[in-house]
Amino acid sequence: MTVIEIDGLRKSYKAGKAVDGVSLRVERGEIFGIVGPNGAGKTTVVECASGLRRPDSGTLRVLGLDPQTNRRELLQHIGAQLQEAALPDAIKVSEALRMYASFYDRPADWRALMDEWGLADKKRASFASLSGGWKQRLFIALALVGNPEVVFLDELTTGLDPSARRTTWGLIRDMRKRGITVVLVTHFMDEAEALCDRIAIIDQGRVIAEGGPSELIAKGRSDSLEGAYFALTGKDVA
Ligand SMILES: Nc1ncnc2c1ncn2[C@@H]1O[C@H](COP(=O)(O)OP(=O)(O)OP(=O)(O)O)[C@@H](O)[C@H]1O
Ligand SMILES: [Mg+2]
C-alpha cells in the first residue's frame, strides 16, 4: 500500500525555487531515503508532506490525507524529527515525553517508550545537559509517542560520532520492524545504503535518481550520476 504520494510538488522562497517538480511514492513499511547536497530541497519536501509548509503547487497525500486541508488529522498519525528541532533547555526528558504524549488522541505509553529507548536513566536530565546522541534518542522517542504510522527523520545522525550513528541505525531498523514507515533525510550515501529499501536522490529541487540502493550505485558507476555520487560520498566512482 502506498502511504505517501507526491506529484509535481513545487515550492519557491524569495530567493528562488527550492522544490521544482518532485514526485515520489513511499510504500507502507519501508525505509525511504531522501538524499542530496545542502540546499537540494529535502527539508522543504518533508515539511510540505508533514503539513508544516504550504506548497505552491502539486498534489500530496499522506495516509490518504491532504497535509494542508487535513492537517490536524494527519498530525495524529505521523511523527517527525525535524532538522532544527530544539526543546527548552530546562525541560526534563520525562517532562518532554509526557508533554508530547498530551498532544495526541491515542498516545503510546510514554513511560514504556522511555524504557524501551533506553532513556529511563536520563529521565530527570535536562535537555541542555544531554549529549548529541542522547538528544537524538529523545527526539526519536518523541517522534514515536503518538503511535505514528509514518515517521519523518531529517538529518537524524548529523553530528553524531560513528558509534552513536550505528546505534541510531539500529533504532531506525527497529521502527521498520514495528511496521512504521520511515522517511529518512540524510547527506550520507553510506547511511542510505545501509538502511533504506529505496532512495530518491534530490538535487536542485528535482529527483535525479530513484531506486534500491544497489541499483543506484550501479547507475552511479555508469552515467551522469557520477557527479552526484561523488558529491554525496566523497568517493570516486570505482
Ligand atoms: N524558510 C526559508 N526561507 C527562505 N528560503 C529557504 C527557506 N527554507 C529553505 N530555503 C531555501 O530553499 C532551498 C532548499 O532548502 P532545503 O532546506 O529544503 O534544502 P535541504 O536539502 O534540506 O538542505 P540541507 O541539506 O542543507 O538541510 C535552499 O536554497 C534554501 O536556502
Ligand atoms: Mg535540510
Image (tube, helix red, strand yellow):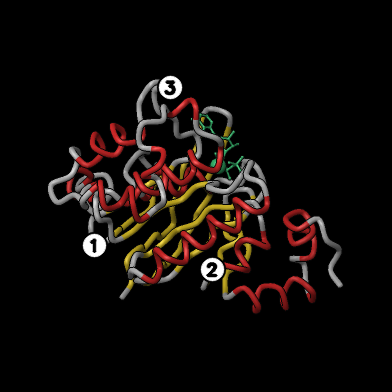
Report the mark closest to the observer, 2 or 1: 2
As shown in the figure, which amino acid type bears the numbered disc 3? Answer: Asp
151 relative to 211 in the view: left or right = left
| Amino acid identity at mark 1 | Gly
Q: Nearer the viewer, residue 129 or 223?
A: 129
The answer for how far apart the CA atoms under marks 3 and 2 are is 33 Å
**Residue beneath disc 3:** 89
Query: Going 24% across and 34% down the picture, which residue do you hit?
Result: 99
Mark 3 or mark 1, earlier in chain: 1
Q: Earlier in the sequence, mark 2 or mark 1?
A: 1
Residue wearing tag 2: 196
Q: Position of residue 28 (x, y in %)?
A: 34, 71
Q: Secondary structure at mark 2?
A: loop
**In the depicted structure, whether residue 115 falls above or below residue 28:** above
Give the CA distance from mark 2 to mark 1: 23 Å
Q: Quadrant of ligand 2?
A: top right
- For the point 60% across and 58% down, which residue is it? 166
Q: Which residue is mark 1?
A: 64
Q: Examine the rendered structure and indicate whether residue 202 appears above or below residue 38.
A: below
Q: Residues within 10 Å of mark 2 (few under 14, many from 20)?
A: many
